[in-house]
Amino acid sequence: MTDTLPTPVPGGLDAQRLREAYRTMRTIRAFEERLHEEFASGDIPGFVHLYAGEEASATGVCMHLDDRDSIASTHRGHGHCIAKGVDVKAMMAEIYGRRTGACQGKGGSMHIADLSKGMLGANGIVGGGPPLICGTALASKQQNTGGVGVAFFGDGASNQGTTLESLNLASVWGLPAIFVAENNGFAEATASAWSVAADNIADRAAGFGIPGVIVDGFDFFAVHEAAGEAIERARGGGGPTLIEVKFTRYYGHFEGDQQSYRLDEVKQARETVDCLKAFRSRVTGTGLLDEAGLESIDGEVFALIDAAVAEAKQAPRPTRSDLETDVYVSY
Amino acid sequence: MARTISYREAINEALTQEMERDSSVIVMGEDNAGGAGGSGEQDAWGGVLGVTKGLYHKFPGRVLDTPISESAFIGAAIGAATRGQRPVAELMFIDFMGVCFDQIFNQAAKFRYMFGGKAVTPVVIRTMYGAGLNAAAQHSQSLYPLFTHIPGLKVVLPSNAYEAKGLMTQAVRDDDPVIFCEHKALYDTTADVPEDSYTIPFGEANVVRDGEDVTIVALGRMVHVAEEAAGELATSGISADVLDLRTTSPLDDETILESVASTGRLVVVDESNPRCNVATDVSALVAREAFSSLRAPIEMVTAPHTPVPFSDALEPLYIPDAQRVVNAVKTVMGGQNA
Ligand SMILES: Cc1ncc(C[n+]2csc(CCOP(=O)(O)OP(=O)(O)O)c2C)c(N)n1
């Protein structure tokens, strides 16, 4: 077997697109790892849920999307935001509660949004996103834009009535909607092996008459390929797909979680199947990108995150005059 | 014997004692034990803020974790209550009522009346409310007025650890559906709490401070804000009667009206949004029943008509504080602040 040629990367991604994919995943990782440190220092208010370990999902899906397309996210939303092109500095300022933040400091980590980018918001309500995506997909269909909607949600959210109703509605209406179940093994402290009564979340697709696919969430290329097929089918009028992405979250449910409910699964995942490591060895092994090129991306990303944190800490806070604005469009 | 314990421990102790006393009491909610199906500890969380910690091992089979399916498990608690169980179900954050409200207000609340007085639904729904932890717009609301609006529900808001234990014990023993609203910023506050079991009856406001010049009606965490304000007012010679409502349904009309009859002035402090809230309800009661005793227009100190802002620069401006209560009292005193 030693003389086998390295497998070419699937999905027809050229060097330029591969660099983009790597940059997005690296940006998400660096953003989250930095937040992990900053949170521990006590500077960040509220609840923060980190997406580290899950980068291949947001990135592999969102690389197929453009400004016609919408996504709905979850409480663990930073990765989805970055992958859909939300400004990293505006995100960081939002998490610090600053007036320069993506939501002027009114939303925070759990509500970062950029509607101009089709990013409908992180969401504090588990299962809040899938119905909204039925709506954005309906709008794309009515307006014939060719746009699709993607709902990201967790294994825990897959048990929420809103999610199951949305799968049915999208199927009945033939909507250009993609449901991405991010199964990171746990909902808070509860294992998906216990809370999801089926063997796989994707198995439930059959009950709604739509395709259900399982992918290895540590493998960017697997996610990219499965999402590409589903999105192409949706754009062509072929209706919704349920994609289950399986992986592990690297940090606790929220920052501060002691995680006594799981043993050392994370250490092992980080060492053996990490999406960034796997991506690197795949693309350098095929000679498409070299280590030096990837390292220079790393350097740019770290500089961006440093600047985002420094600027966020210096940015002005909202003031009393902001408290009662923007409840309505007109009064 | 009383000792000092926290609000969190007081609720836990009430649940423990009621589970020991009555085998029909069961507890359920997301991660009320925690760790189901995982490789690590069972009872890893005891609820997201640790209120039910330890019950899982003490009462095997009676602490049920649930999938994230509020309509199903809140509804299941209600259904079980109709058939001889006394479930205490946790809705976690009150904001999540949106997901399962039908089971609460069309089902549980209406059985007794709609079925001609034949149904008994002794369910307790525990839920945390309130701002102060920068938990943002979907995890910080004070939605108890919505439950108060619904006939058939009892709505309880303990203001400290002593109140929490007595009111929780009463809630479990009560034969009606009870919405038990725990302020998340109170969990670590402590008070002297008797070890023995005791109940605090619903519909009896607590006079936490006697005074003559003005009545301050408050509830939940706002009781502390009202007390702080009353302390400050005392230094300028204004004495305030401070009432802790304890329950908004049933409402203790009598104690409110008696107090206003003697003070002639009313300030209501309510953390919820200002339209159709407890402050407007109490104010309407007083305007209707005690108009002739009023020596000044009623003042209400509430959150503004906005969602709860995230930023730590805005949230403190949103939550009613002692200074605003002091100002309101000075307004009803007509500037005569001694
Ligand atoms: C309706 C609702 N119920 C419960 C919660 C509390 N909660 C927040 S995140 C979470 C777990 C979600 O698990 P999952 O969907 O698997 O996403 P993950 O956290 O693993 O990304 C829970 C129970 C909530 N925010 N909204």
Image (cartoon, coloured by chain):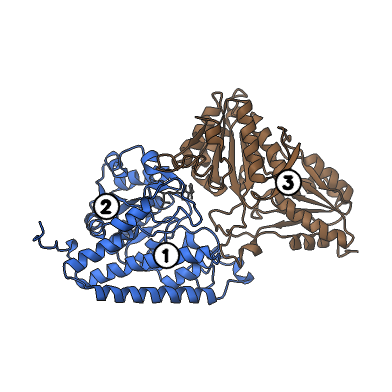
Chain colours: A blue, B brown
Residue A216: numbered disc: 2
Specify the quadrant of the image occupied by residue B118: top right
Of residue B65 and residue A115, the one placed in the foreground of this image is B65
Up/down of A119 relative to A240, above or below: below
> Do tags 1 and 2 sit on the same chain?
yes
* Element marked by disc 1: helix
Q: Count how many numbered circles sit on residues in the image.
A: 3
The percent coordinates of residue B26 (x first, y second) are 55, 31
Residue A62: numbered disc: none
Query: On the picture, is A297 further left or further right than B308?
Result: left
Q: What type is the residue that disc 1 sits on?
A: Glu
Q: Distance between the residues labelled 3 and 2?
A: 52 Å
Q: Name the residue under label 3.
A: B191
The quadrant the C terminus of chain B occupies is bottom right
Query: Chain ID for label 1?
Result: A
First in residue order: circle 1 vs circle 2: 1
Query: Chain ID for label 2?
Result: A
Q: What type is the residue that disc 2 sits on?
A: Asp
Q: What type is the residue that disc 3 sits on?
A: Ala
Of residue A268 and residue B83, the one placed in the foreground of this image is A268
Circles 1 and 2: CB distance less than 8 Å? no
Circles 1 and 3: CB distance less than 8 Å? no
